[in-house]
Image: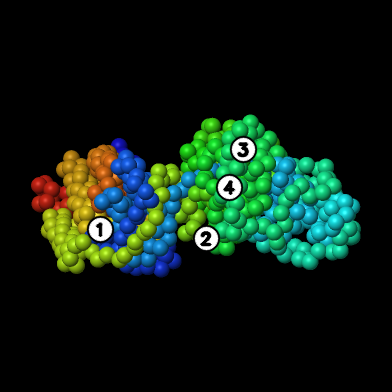
Amino acid sequence: MARPSTRPGRTLVVFFLGVAILYGLTALAGTWKPALGLDLQGGTRIVLIPDGDPSQENLEEARQIIDDRVNGSGVSEGEVTTSSGNITVEIPGEDQSDLEETVQRTAQLRFRLVACSPLLGTACGATGQVSTDPGTQVPGATTPGGQQGGQQGGTQNGQQNGQQQGGQQDGAGQSGNNRPAPGFAQRDLLTSGTASPSPSGQPSDQPSGQAGDGASTSPSAEPSGSASPSGSAGPGAAAGGQAAIDSCLAAAADDETLADPLAWINSPTPACAEAFTAYQCPAEGTGQAMPDDPATPLITCDDEGIPYLLSSSIIEGTDLTDAAAGIPQGQVGWAVTLSFNGEGTDTFGEVSQALAGQERPFAIVLDGGVISAPTIDTPILNGEAQITGDFGEEEADSLATSLKYGSLPIAFGDTSVETIGPSLAGSQLSAGIYAGAAGLLLVMLYCLVYYRGLGLVVVGSLAVAAAITYAMVLLLGAGAGFTLTLPGIAGLIIAVGVTADSFIIFFERIRDEMREGKSMRVAVESGWQRARVTRLAANVVSLLSAAVLYIFATGVVKGFGFALGLSTLIDLAVLFWFTKPMVSYLARYSFFNGGGRLSGLSPETLGMDRVPATAGGKA
């Protein structure tokens, strides 16, 4: 015999406590109105115009990647189409400025090693060696060390003092495993010392130290041809700027050390070092002096205007398996966490072992610009990396989404953004709501007439299911971008029938058990054991149907599958934690247990002469 249910009242209390928490979270989200989809509310249309004349294959590949980015959560139901050689993106809602950057970002991610940058506290000599002479500055940067120790001195002693101080201060100022993003580092450099140098040749009050960052520690008697900031060429000023870049690329093609980035950064191609010292970042920040080719060096900037000479690419974005935004443990700022595949993990492990403890940064380059340049304290062998910086939540989510779904095969030039109206008339929404309300009312009325007292359990269960569904729609709209479309409303309406089916199976099993001579309290438990299996099987079929629609369909059909799956899960929760405990609780009262006329379990209803006695059997 089946075991009787114990403490149904406790189950109901816990269940309603969970519903209260759900509505508490909804209140924290601050919205009590569901987000509507394109068909009911309208939204934003973004037209992306490609640069050049891309092939139809590349255009379709870009459309698919953008569709993955827009509908990454699977519930926003944005539409991405191609027309007349352009890509059109339509997204529910009017305030979608952050999504515009997400859809048109090329998202070409590369990891490169830093050969020259003000972050190293050193300058790039024209001979191709990484110089430790702080008397020669990279354009746009203030030397962090040696500012008061012969920075512009003409004597050899002054130059050597500046070299030693620069190595020591740079090593102290850039320690730590997760150094801030380049922008923060630059501000530290610009404010850590006085801008006016001491007289030449005067020693600093600070003790001298070793040159850091893995650079050459042999002091040169003279600067090796590097230009000072005052003599550096602006982005459009140097007539020979492009010639220097072309010379760098040509010389790098013949440089055998380029294939070994770890060796190349200690002795970069001389022509590239010359091009780097002549390059100045644009005033607006990020800019690159040459194409972002993974097989060649790269001269570029970050968004704070710090220039970099970088090695060839060591890891490509194609080596990523996942990217996610979040706040790392023990930190307060947002970051993007990257996971590499096997090849990327091996490469990153080898590089991190070589750079660990040397205070030499590597650069994370996105679409040709440096977005972060952290150093490595200890080897990283687990294939995990973080992009940190001055990220907000939206910026981190946008970057993670772009990286997760891959880089675009084409770039976009002009972009037009406009607000569009709903594709369906407002009466369609009203008609959908009225249809749902009418269906719900008819089911309740039928159950009250047929099941009488037990019909109250049906009414209560449907009301609770409706309340939970509404709260989940609100929470998903605020947290995952879920939008309610007309097909989604249809999926929720269908759930009314699914939920009612659960009651019918359960109640009919109770009646069958009572016809066999069991009391209601025993019949509830034994009937539940059999009805539960049947109901689980039916709901699994419904969930499988919803999963197929969600995975393989697109657009609003995917939204219909999501709504159907959500309502099926809610049906299971209500059946197990509300309907069943409520029936067990009512079985304790003589009105139901004794077969009251309006209980739905009277002898006339069961087709029996009399209802089995309360003591007519124990479970």
The disc label shown at residue 485, or none: 1
The Cα atoms of the two marked residues, 1 and 3, are separated by: 59 Å
For the residues labelled 2 and 1, say whether their Cβ atoms are less than 8 Å apart. Answer: no
Q: Disc 1 and disc 4: Cα gap in Å?
A: 57 Å
**Residue 465 in sight:** yes
* Relative horizontal placement of residue 97, taking residue 328 as reference (left or right): left
Determine if residue 169 is in view: no
Question: For residue 392, which numbered disc appears in the image?
Answer: 2
Q: Are marks 1 and 3 in contact (CB under 8 Å)?
A: no
Task: Look at mark 4 in the image and give the residue it sits on.
Answer: 243
Where is residue 15 shown, x and y percent of the image? Answer: 37, 56
Would you call the spot at circle 4 few (<14 residues within 10 Å), some (14-19), or many (20 or more)?
few
Which amino acid does the dot numbered 4 rest on? Ala
Q: Amino acid at mark 1?
A: Thr
Q: Residue at x 65, y 43 (%)?
A: 271
Q: CA distance from mark 2 to mark 1?
A: 30 Å
Comparing 415 with 34, the one in front is: 415
Quarter location, residue 407: top left
Rendered location of residue 452, percent (x, y): 16, 58
Q: Residue at x 88, y 51 (%)?
A: 156
Callout in the foreground (4, 3): 4
Answer whether labels 3 and 2 touch (C-beta < 8 Å): no
Quadrant of the frame with the C terminus: top left
Residue closer to the observer: 392 or 617: 392
Q: Secondary structure at mark 2?
A: loop
Q: Could you classify mark 2 by the number of other residues whose Cα lies within 10 Å: few (under 14), some (14-19), or many (20 or more)?
A: few
Mark 4 or mark 1, which is nearer the start of the sequence?
4
Q: In what quadrant of the picture does the N terminus appear?
A: top left
Q: Nearer the viewer, residue 569 or 273?
A: 273
